[in-house]
Image: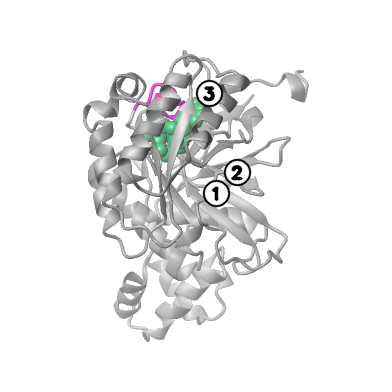
């Protein structure tokens, strides 16, 4: 038998190993109006809707039976009508030596999504205003949760493992917000005491599942009570999505996966550039009304020999200067994945790139790869099971 060290991670269709659960009418994910409609349908007083919201989003009840504020007759009525809480469940946990945990979270239709818990953040929040006005952290959790928005992804970035899956389906708002609550429950985290950041940077392109993604954000802000200033969404550059996002009264911070310093390289590594080029992208980003101290993050995955040379750094400086907005750059050394024909950048090229940006007045951070050993790092998310 292989020892733990020799275990191989092989990539399988996880639906083959997860039982398909019968379809349910999930309560988790319903917004206030929908809960009120449900109360009306069941001919129970309107305040029952508030009690349900409290149980779902503040108390994180697992089953209807846990909701003791509701009379048993109502719980039975809900069950008979096919309702259940249907909070997503952790099907499998992979633990990294660096404290990162990656979860396969089972959806009701037997698919899995990936969510990552990173203690002490991922270094990507520095300098973007998210620590503005914080009290001394008094809690014992200081963590970032990386949330998926789709199963698979349609965008086809050449360096990303998730792209290999293609798009399987969109997640619902309940499945997106549910990942967060499921992981918070696992760690006995408490909102208000613990410092929890959310990054919508898991599997999928959030702006190609815009409505469910924003519904999830509103649930997490209004009901779960996580401040939107602690949330960041990353997009590969879906221009209509960025434009809608700019009009949102409540929204996470924005990160753009720039990843290349000119259209030629970007087209090669991110074919979506043929639809919206860097100019279109920058025009859309400039329309975003920024909050005080807010910066737009540009993520830049360094691919050895492809986009990591001094001339590329100089082009990035020019691009960001021309955009003329408060910005910062998160540099991510490419995380390898099976069958992806790129090379990791050298440590010298990474620091030289960063220094070039800093010398030109652009805040630049190197994102520490988290959980690389368990395929939890950026762009490594793909349904994997250990054999
Ligand atoms: N689809 C969204 C969000 C998920 S990807 C987006 O593309 O922005 C999150 C980040 O991981 C992106 O910045 C992406 O460029 C980066 N990424 C993808 N594959 C990677 C890899 N193999 N190594 C390092 N970063 C990667
Ligand atoms: Fe999709 Fe983001 Fe991966 Fe591109 S980098 S394929 S947009 S998940």
- Count of numbered badges drawn on the protein: 3
- Comparing labels 2 and 3, the label whose residue is closer to the camera: 2
Q: Which residue is mark 2?
A: 122
Quarter occupied by residue 374? top right
Disc nearer the start of the sequence (2/3): 3
- Residue 94 magenta-drawn? no
Q: Residues within 10 Å of mark 2 (few under 14, many from 20)?
A: many
**Residue 307 seen anywhere in this rendered image of the structure:** no
Magenta segment includes 158? yes
Number of the label disc, if any, that sits on residue 11: 3
Please name which of the two marks, 1 or 3, marks the residue nearer to the observer: 1
Dot 2 beta carbon under 8 Å from ligand 1: no
Q: Which residues are magenta?
A: 156-165
Mark 3 is surrounded, within 10 Å at the Cα level, by few (under 14), some (14 to 19) or many (20 or more) other residues, namely: few
Q: CB atoms at circles 2 and 3 under 8 Å apart?
A: no
Picture residue at 54% right of the left edge, 65% below the top? 63
Q: Residues within 10 Å of mark 1 (few under 14, many from 20)?
A: many
169 horizontally vs 179: left or right = left
| SS type, badge 3 | strand
Q: Is residue 107 left or right of residue 208?
A: right
The circle drawn on residue 125 is 1
């Amino acid at each position: 038998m292989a020892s733990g060290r020799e275990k191989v991670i092989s990539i399988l269709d996880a639906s083959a190993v997860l039982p398909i659960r019968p379809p349910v009418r999930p309560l988790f994910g319903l917004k206030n109006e929908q809960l009120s409609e449900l109360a009306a349908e069941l001919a129970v007083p309107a305040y029952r809707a508030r009690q349900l919201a409290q149980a779902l989003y503040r108390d994180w009840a697992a089953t209807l039976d846990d909701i003791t504020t509701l009379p048993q007759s109502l719980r039975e009525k809900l069950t008979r009508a096919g309702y259940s809480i249907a909070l997503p469940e952790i099907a499998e946990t992979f633990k990294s030596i660096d404290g990162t945990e990656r979860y396969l979270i089972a959806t009701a239709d037997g698919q899995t999504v990936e969510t990552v818990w990173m203690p002490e953040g991922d270094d990507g929040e520095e300098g973007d205003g998210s620590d503005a006005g914080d009290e001394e952290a008094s809690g014992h959790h200081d963590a970032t949760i990386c949330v998926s928005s789709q199963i698979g992804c349609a965008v086809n970035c050449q360096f990303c493992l998730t792209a290999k899956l293609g798009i399987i389906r969109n997640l619902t708002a309940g499945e997106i917000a549910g990942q967060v609550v499921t992981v918070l429950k696992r760690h006995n985290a408490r909102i208000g005491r613990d410092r929890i950041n959310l990054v919508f940077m898991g599997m999928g392109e959030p702006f190609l599942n815009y409505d469910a993604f924003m519904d999830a954000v509103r649930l997490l802000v209004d009901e779960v009570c996580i401040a939107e200033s602690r949330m960041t969404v990353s997009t590969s550059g879906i221009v209509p999505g960025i434009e809608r996002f700019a009009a949102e009264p409540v929204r996470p911070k924005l990160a753009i996966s720039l990843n290349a310093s000119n259209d030629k390289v970007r087209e090669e590594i991110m074919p979506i550039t043929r639809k919206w080029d860097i100019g279109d992208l920058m025009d859309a980003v400039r329309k975003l009304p920024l909050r005080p101290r807010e910066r737009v993050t540009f993520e830049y995955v360094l691919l050895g020999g492809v986009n990591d040379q001094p001339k590329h750094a100089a082009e990035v400086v020019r691009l960001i200067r021309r955009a003329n907005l408060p910005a910062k750059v998160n540099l991510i050394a490419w995380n390898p994945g099976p069958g992806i024909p790129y090379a990791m950048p050298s440590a010298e090229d990474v620091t030289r790139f960063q220094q070039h940006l800093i010398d030109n007045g652009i805040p630049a951070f190197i994102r520490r790869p988290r959980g690389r050993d368990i395929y939890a790092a950026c762009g490594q998310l793909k349904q994997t099971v250990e054999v």
